[in-house]
Amino acid sequence: MSKNNRKRVNNTTTKKGKNTGFGRLMCSLVILGVVLLLFINYALPLLKKEVTHIAAEKTVEMITSNPEKIVGDNKEIKKVLESMSDEDKEVVTEIIENHIDAETATEIMEYVNNGDKAALMEYAGENLSADEMMELMEMYGKYSDTLK
């Protein structure tokens, strides 16, 4: 290879744009930003929904498996909790899932631990929809025979 050809080959293979490193950095940052936005807009709500569902299931499971902690000495309510069908447990799980968050769970658990039934009833009246209240009333009617 002649001297002129070597210069031309070296100049063309090593010659790059002035801002190639900066361009790659900017491109990487843009791609990272897009991925982060997609995660925030799509993946995070899905994860939040799944975590909320699991928390609601665990809450219902805790209530039905340990009714003595929830109702205390009230044997009638304990019988109702023990005899609830899986379908009714799922309805209660959905209602809890619609209204549970970290602050709410802490607040409700305080009411339960303190045995503050009035505060629980007030909370339910303020936060549950009319349809949810009707579903709970239907369940109450269904299990009212157990209370007698």
Image: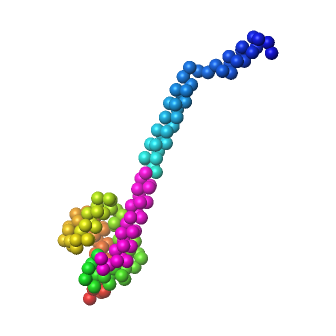
Horizontal side, residue 107 vs residue 92: left or right = left
Q: In the picture shown, does residue 15 fall above or below 97?
A: above
Residue drawn at 64 percent across, 19 percent down: 15
Outermost residue to the right:
1
Q: In the picture shown, does residue 132 fall above or below 72?
A: above
Q: Would you say residue 13 sits in the magenta stretch? A: no
Q: Quadrant of the C terminus?
A: bottom left
Outermost residue to the left:
118
Q: Quadrant of residue 132?
A: bottom left
Outermost residue to the top:
4
x then y, percent, for residue 90: 40, 71
Closer-to-camera residue (6/30): 6
What secondary structure is the magenta-colored segment mainly?
Answer: helix
Q: Quadrant of the N terminus?
A: top right
Is residue 125 at all visible to an observer of this figure?
Answer: no
Horizontal side, residue 4 vs residue 43: left or right = right
Q: Which residues are magenta?
A: 44-69
Outermost residue to the bottom:
148
Q: Would you say residue 49 sits in the magenta stretch? A: yes
x then y, percent, for residue 37: 44, 42
Q: In the picture shown, does residue 52 fall above or below 64?
A: above
Is residue 45 at all visible to an observer of this figure?
Answer: yes
Q: How is the image coloured?
A: rainbow
Closer-to-camera residue (23/7): 7
Residue drawn at 41 percent across, 64 percent down: 54
Residue drawn at 40 percent across, 68 percent down: 57
Residue drawn at 28 percent across, 85 percent down: 75
x then y, percent, for residue 53: 40, 63
Q: Quadrant of residue 8?
A: top right
x then y, percent, for residue 91: 37, 71
